[in-house]
């Protein structure tokens, strides 16, 4: 297939082009995202979306879009596109697009009569700065360009509305202007690589609509502020670079900066390169910390997602050093044996029962790629802190029972990854002993004992009897020989045998509490009822509570989130267990799963993998357009196939 390229017929078809989104991020935590037609369909879209520490540390949309107008013979051709009420698109700049190429950047080719203009956009790697290069490829007559910036200056979860408090003043800077719509924000410096006239025509553009927000049941109308426009003549063959940055730059270096940044990009000209490039986008380095963004465009740093995704994002791509940096950053944020699952740096939420156990699992994977590092010496204190907190009891009623199993949860709380809550009640209440938590618990203790052997005899002595007790209790409580699979959770006298994918974790771990025969039976059940080409369903279609389509307002979507919706991240653990049980004969299925995602490189989030998919065929992509643990799972499966063949 031709990677990440779209032609005129696809681009002018709005039904097609508006459903395909581009997203690029940088190490500074900024991102740029829109559709391949250039029309923003989400409140999260924008050309410069970056964290603003002075306000809340979250991402804020500064530059929403940039309309470019070609002027020839005193005629204006606006290449922008915005949606208004009643399916009205003004202007209709998409009709001039002839080609979109996202392999080495985001390059759009426009044709207006005899004018051919290209537009290439990229983010500077370490700064809150977007660069957009315009090149006049063809022109038979004198040509001018106008650049009209649409500003938002608001949190990316919110929307901007026209108001009397906006600061309409601007500050002249070299070859551009500086604008700060509200106090607390950094000044946005909009500069060009050559002299241009800035014409101040401050105005609001009202009721621009975002159709994806409308579908999701949210407020979907926004007013955007335009301070004026830049105008300059341009010659055939000439390039002009537009920069929007939170810092004033030397405009004479913009062309060179664009070329330098462009040369750093991994060409997304193959399936593998798309996955690796996407994996790199989740890594952020700010304030001396290296962290993983859980997904784009609306997720932040989540503890659970970080540890589950980390091996695929880093180890499978050969970036072992970054894996260590992320682990060290997360360990520095531990508290009472728990990791922050979400929330701000100042007010994190430690509401994840599985994140600490996934931490030990990710250490386990990390240890396989490094040589000469004593894991117990470096991380033993953190591992002991986790295990002791779970054994002795910690927040949210997380504690070890007499039988060695881990109990977690309180009424109204959702502590596992199935954490959707509606009206204060978990949609999938799993209070008690969840199956994957206890499989991870067993794996963690066994691995810790292996690391501590001959290094920490006191630890070994106090924990050495635990694996046998846990294994016996696990099989006794979760396994049903007649049904041939594991209960999803056990609480008091309840053993929930809803067919869910959490049991597959028990088949994939280095230390599993179940036998190979049990693993095989579990995998057969999962394959027959939960496996799809895009991941595992969260509930069997045979269950009366199954929901096969994820759409509608937030409550409707939350009720479907873990009741049948497909999640790609689970495939890594299905694939690992399947390969362990079936050996080489299992490669056929794994290749089919891995190769299947190649089709998705030109769908939804271009060059990446979505958060979730519908449970029902044709398994449409849903949720966030680029999810860390989804990309990581596909990379891990690819690595499994490669390693098995070498």
Image (tube, rainbow, N blue to C red):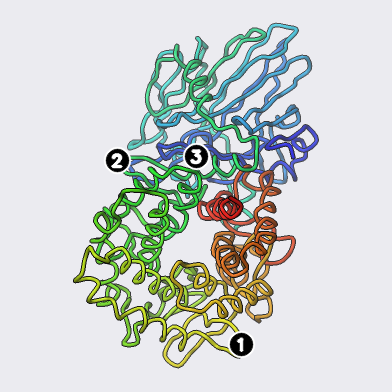
Q: Residue at x 42, y 60 (%)?
A: 304
Q: Secondary structure at mark 2?
A: loop
Disc nearer the start of the sequence (1/2): 2
Q: Secondary structure at mark 1?
A: loop
Nearer the observer: mark 1 or 2; the answer is 1
Residue that label 3 marks: 162
Q: Residue at x 39, y 48 (%)?
A: 323
Nearer the observer: mark 1 or 3; the answer is 1
Instruction: Find residue 391 and report its horizontal and vertical position in percent.
Output: 28, 77
Whether tag 1 and tag 2 are in contact, CB under 8 A, the answer is no
Instruction: Find residue 122 and report its horizontal and vertical position in percent.
Output: 53, 29
Q: CA distance from mark 1 to mark 2?
A: 51 Å
Nearer the observer: mark 2 or 3; the answer is 2
Numbered tag placed on residue 483 in the rendering: 1
Crowding near pointer 2: few (<14 within 10 Å), some, many (20+)?
Answer: few
Foreground pick, 617 / 60:
617
Q: Secondary structure at mark 3?
A: loop
């Amino acid at each position: 297939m031709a990677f990440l390229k779209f032609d005129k017929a696809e681009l002018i078809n709005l039904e097609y082009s508006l459903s395909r989104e581009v997203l690029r991020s940088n190490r500074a935590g900024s991102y740029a995202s829109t559709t391949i037609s250039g029309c923003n369909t989400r409140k999260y879209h924008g050309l410069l979306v970056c964290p603003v520490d002075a306000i809340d540390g979250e991402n804020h949309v500064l530059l929403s879009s940039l309309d470019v107008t070609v002027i020839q013979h005193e005629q204006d051709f606006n290449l922008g596109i915005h949606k208004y009420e009643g399916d009205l698109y003004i202007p209709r700049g998409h009709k001039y697009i002839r080609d979109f190429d996202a392999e080495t950047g985001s390059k759009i080719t426009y044709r207006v009569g005899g004018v051919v203009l290209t537009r290439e956009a990229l983010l500077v790697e370490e700064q809150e700065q977007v660069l957009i290069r315009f090149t006049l490829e063809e022109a038979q007559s004198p040509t001018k360009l106008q650049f009209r910036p649409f500003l938002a200056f608001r949190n990316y979860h919110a929307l901007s509305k026209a108001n009397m408090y906006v600061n309409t003043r601007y500050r002249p800077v070299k070859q551009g202007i500086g604008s700060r719509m509200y106090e607390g924000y950094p000044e946005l410096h909009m500069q060009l690589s050559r002299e241009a006239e800035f014409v101040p025509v401050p105005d609001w553009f009202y009721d621009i609509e975002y159709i994806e927000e409308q579908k999701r049941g949210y407020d979907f109308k926004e007013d955007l502020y335009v301070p004026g426009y830049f105008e300059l003549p341009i010659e055939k063959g000439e390039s002009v670079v537009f920069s929007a940055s939170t810092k004033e730059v030397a405009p004479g270096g913009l062309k060179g900066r664009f070329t330098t940044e462009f040369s750093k990009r991994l060409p997304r000209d193959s399936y593998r390169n798309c996955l690796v490039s996407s994996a790199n986008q989740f890594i952020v380095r700010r304030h001396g910390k290296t962290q993983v963004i859980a997904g784009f465009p609306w997720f932040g740093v989540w503890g659970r997602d970080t540890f589950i995704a980390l091996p695929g994002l880093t180890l499978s791509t050969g970036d072992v050093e970054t894996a260590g940096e992320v682990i060290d950053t997360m360990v520095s944020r531990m508290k009472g044996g728990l990791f922050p699952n979400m929330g701000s740096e100042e007010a994190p939420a430690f509401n994840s029962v599985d994140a600490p156990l996934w931490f030990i699992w990710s250490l386990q994977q990390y240890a396989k790629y490094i040589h000469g590092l004593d894991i117990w010496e470096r991380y033993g204190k953190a591992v002991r802190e986790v295990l002791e907190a779970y054994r002795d009891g910690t927040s949210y009623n997380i504690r070890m029972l007499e039988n060695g199993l881990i109990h977690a949860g309180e009424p109204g709380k959702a502590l596992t990854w199935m954490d959707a809550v509606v009206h204060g009640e978990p949609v999938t209440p799993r209070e008690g002993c969840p199956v994957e938590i206890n499989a991870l618990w067993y794996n963690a203790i066994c691995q810790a004992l292996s690391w501590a052997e001959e290094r920490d005899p006191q630890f070994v002595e106090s924990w050495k009897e635990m694996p046998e007790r846990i294994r016996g209790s696990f099989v006794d409580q979760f396994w049903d020989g007649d049904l041939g699979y594991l209960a999803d959770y056990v609480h008091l006298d309840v053993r929930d045998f809803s067919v869910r994918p959490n049991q597959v974790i028990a088949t994939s771990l280095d230390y599993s509490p179940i036998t190979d025969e049990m693993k095989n039976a579990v995998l057969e059940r999962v394959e027959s009822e939960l496996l799809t080409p895009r991941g595992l369903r969260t509930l069997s279609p045979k269950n009366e509570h199954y929901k096969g389509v994820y759409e509608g307002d937030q409550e409707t979507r939350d009720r479907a989130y873990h009741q049948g919706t497909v999640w790609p991240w689970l495939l890594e653990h299905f694939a690992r267990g399947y390969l362990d049980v079936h050996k080489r004969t299992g490669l056929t299925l794994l290749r089919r799963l891995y190769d299947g995602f190649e089709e998705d490189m030109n769908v939804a989030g271009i060059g990446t993998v979505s958060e979730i998919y519908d449970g029902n065929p044709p398994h449409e992509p849903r949720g966030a357009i680029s999810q860390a643990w989804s990309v990581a799972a596909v990379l891990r499966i690819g690595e499994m196939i490669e390693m098995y063949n070498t």
